[in-house]
Image (spheres, rainbow, N blue to C red):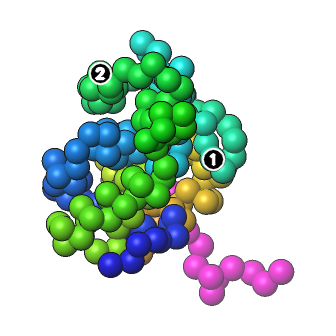
Amino acid sequence: MPKSNREGKALVLSRDQLQAVFVRLDYPHCAISRLCYLTASRAGEVVALPVTAISHEAISIKQTKTKATKEINLYPELSDVVKQLVPQKGTYYFPGRSGKTHLTLRAFQKQLDKTFDYLGIKGASSHSFRRSMATHLYRAGVDLESIRQVTGHKSLDSLTLYIDIPRLEAQSKVAAAVGKLWNRTSLPNALEMPLV
């Protein structure tokens, strides 16, 4: 199984696959995976989550690419995961072996790869959680701008390349949109239009 995937190519997991992964993983790897999905964040951002990042109302995640911080309100499902986090005396929610720094991304990915292999899920990586959330939100009817704010993408162009939108689905949406904007009797026939 591939151990790494480009972000936009990571497998989009189904709801059943996500559930199987979450059940199979132990703490803290299960909590990290669920946070990656529910906040549409990169695994590297979640493993480095400081104890100061979570309030009673929101979770603040510093993005590794843009260095910007995104805030996500603690909606019920996210709040449930936060409540399960083990309180830490140190700096991070997910400390490494020494306790002085956070769990490494490599250590998390190693456990995740074992789980994907065990479940027979090919083509998945830690980034599958983030891409799956973005795709699931899109399929649920959430507008692209709202999804962009959750994922932290700089532009809608980069987001649309990132979300798994089947080609035929995209074409059918374009056709439906044109049909609403024009009807076949009102749209000028190209052969009848004057040359400029």
Whether residue 192 is situated above or below residue 135 in the rendered picture: below
- The residue most toward the right is 196
Q: Taking 104 as reference, is 193 left or right? A: right
Q: Amino acid at mark 1?
A: Thr
Q: Range of the magenta residues? A: 179-196
**Label 2 – label 1 distance at C-alpha:** 25 Å
Residue sitting at 42 percent across and 67 percent down? 10
In the image, 141 versus 180, the foreground residue is: 141
* 2 and 1 marks in contact (CB < 8 Å): no
Residue 53 location (% of width, % of height): 52, 24
- The residue most toward the front is 98
Helix, strand or loop at disc 2? helix
Q: Amino acid at mark 2?
A: Lys
In the image, 79 versus 117, the foreground residue is: 117
Residue holding disc 2: 83
The magenta stretch spans residue 192: yes
Q: Taking 137 as reference, is 7 left or right? A: right
Residue holding disc 1: 64
